[in-house]
Amino acid sequence: MAKESDPKKKKNPVLNLVAGGTAGFVESSICHPLDTIKTRMQLRRQQSTLHAVRARSSLMEPGIGRRSMSTSLAEPKKWKSTIEQATSNAERPRPPKVVEASLGPFGTAKRIIQREGFFSLYKGLTAVWTGIVPKMAIRFLTFEQYREGLQKFTGQKGEYSTSINLTAGLACGLTEAVLIVTPAEVCKIRMQSQFNSLIDPSQLARRKYTNVIQTAYTITKEEGFGALYKGIIPTMLRQGCNQAVNFTTYNIFKRKVLDYQNKKELDHWQSLILGGVSGGFGPLANNPLDVCKTRLQKQVIKPGVEPRYTGVVQAISLIYKEEGFFSLWKGITPRLLRIVPGQAITFMTYEAVSSALTKSGYFA
């Protein structure tokens, strides 16, 4: 395969589609359980919020507070009842603390496997396959097309500049978010977030979402077609940021390595390492957007009911206010564990398939 940074050697668009789609299929099949863990962690409300709600509700229980203490002494039965109720409330054992909010990625995985079975880690995989194969195909195709177009538009010669790679990465991320990622993510998150044990036939029979087609149909029927595009703004921002960073850093590293070794093609292990390193920068920068996106896409739209999260800014501010700053970084560990090896596998597979098909003469 010719050196990628050399724009004189154009890749066949079909080659980009095939290599990108194959890379997406391989990557998702290996890394999907980590995405399920990340989603479950992000959907968990912070425990401080639950304690605050419980405290407010207990203060509003009848028979407790100034209003009840002002009961007339001329009504001994009512006064006695008030004292007994206050005493019983004070002595009533508190419900055990829910520890789910403090579970890490390994604890979350263990809880899912124990309660729902091992293959519950693969919930939503059909939605991912349906989305990721065309997503990766579109990603690599549009990236190459955008940067070739930008090269012609700017009149630059020689290697693709960093600014062109950055802009092309941003554009391809926005494109895939609109065409593929947002509706696929909505379906995937609905399937991942529902609790049902795959080892209990009765629960399997009662589950609302069964596969990606049925999930998309149910969402559209109950909430309207627009519900498939809930969270599109944070999804576009996340995908645009990710691909701008991924493609820019990968091509910078790749150019340095190839120039240093005076080679035209990376070894497979080199593209694996460079892909993993470049994939880690995006999540560190945009995890709050990912948390916001997950909350927006999980909530069900009901007629006449005001949704809890209404937009990017409102969702982020509400999560920060009720759950604290670090709640915006929920799921960062499994997300990094998911994306870093995922990007490593993606770039390695793409380079390997692209090189093999080019050498075979199918896409000369």
Image (cartoon, rainbow, N blue to C red):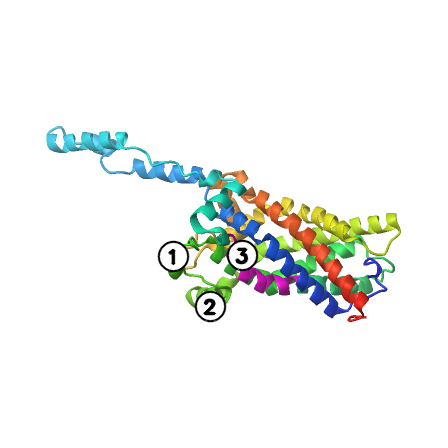
Q: Residues within 10 Å of mark 3 (few under 14, many from 20)?
A: many
Mark pair 2, 1: CA separation:
21 Å
Q: Residues within 10 Å of mark 2 (few under 14, many from 20)?
A: some
Mark pair 3, 1: CA separation:
29 Å
**For the residues carrying marks 2 and 1, which lies nearer the camera in this image?**
1
Position of the C terminus, as image quadrant, is bottom right
Q: Amino acid at mark 3?
A: Gly
* Disc marking residue 231: 3
> Residue 165 versus residue 255: which sits nearer the camera?
255
Residue 124 colored magenta? yes
> Residue 295 versus residue 23: which sits nearer the camera?
23
Q: Secondary structure at mark 2?
A: helix
Name which residue lies at 82% across and 57% down: 5
Residue 108 lies, with reference to residue 303, above or below; the image says: above
> Residue 107 versus residue 119: which sits nearer the camera?
119
- Of marks 3 and 1, which one's residue comes earlier in the chain? 1
Q: Give percent across and percent down for residue 46.
A: 46, 41
Position of the N terminus, as image quadrant, is bottom right
The part of the image, by quadrant, that contains residue 98 is top left
Residue where numbered disc 1 is placed:
203
Q: Amino acid at mark 2?
A: Tyr
Residue where numbered disc 2 is placed:
217
**For the residues carrying marks 2 and 3, which lies nearer the camera in this image?**
2
Residue 31 lies, with reference to residue 149, above or below; the image says: above
Name which residue lies at 17% across and 32% down: 71
> Residue 158 versus residue 267: which sits nearer the camera?
267
| Residue interval drawn in magenta | 121-136
